[in-house]
Amino acid sequence: MAFVQLRKGPDVVGSFGLLQPLADGLKLMIKEPLSPSSANFSLFRMAPVATFMLSLVARAVVPFDYGIVLSDPNIGLLYLFAISSLGVYGIIIAGWSSN
């Protein structure tokens, strides 16, 4: 399908397609920047970025292979729960900033 539309497919962006989520997030933010007229522009634009970044930070404790992990796995479950619960604040900030 990507070849017919003359675009790069999800397996071509980055090594093994690992950069495809970043490309999709960037496209989502740039494609149609709609915001309410009475919104606080900076907070309204930073709310999805905060949610996206927290979802990426939460992956630091997920092991890649046996013994290969970015951070200490002893507190990994507590860290994962804490970061996952902070992701809701991006949605709250987006609603609050839109008045």
Image (cartoon, helix red, strand yellow):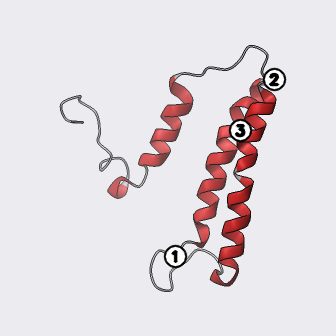
Mark 1 nearby-residue class (10 Å; few <14, some 14–19, many ≥20) = some
Residue 56, quarter of the rendered image: bottom right
Spatial CA distance of label 2 from label 1 is: 41 Å
Q: Earlier in the sequence, mark 3 or mark 1?
A: 3
Q: Name the residue under label 2.
A: 99
Q: Earlier in the sequence, mark 2 or mark 1?
A: 1
Q: Is mark 2 on a helix, strand or loop?
A: loop
Give the residue type at disc 3. Answer: Ala
Q: Mark 3 points at which residue?
A: 47
Q: Is mark 1 on a helix, strand or loop?
A: loop
Looking at the image, is 4 positioned above or below residue 65? above
Q: Position of residue 37 (x, y in %)?
A: 74, 13
Residue that appears at 76% across and 29% down = 42
Q: Position of residue 70 (x, y in %)?
A: 58, 74
Spatial CA distance of label 3 from label 1 is: 28 Å
Residue that appears at 71% across and 61% down = 83
Q: In which quarter of the image is the C terminus?
A: top right
Give the residue type at disc 2. Answer: Asn
Q: Name the residue under label 1.
A: 63
Q: Position of residue 44 (x, y in %)?
A: 73, 30
Mark 2 nearby-residue class (10 Å; few <14, some 14–19, many ≥20) = few
Spatial CA distance of label 3 from label 2 is: 14 Å
Question: Looking at the image, is mark 2 or mark 1 nearer the viewer?
Answer: 2
Q: Residue furthest left?
A: 4
Q: Is mark 3 on a helix, strand or loop?
A: helix
| For residue 24, side relative to residue 7 (left or right) | right
Give the residue type at disc 1. Answer: Pro
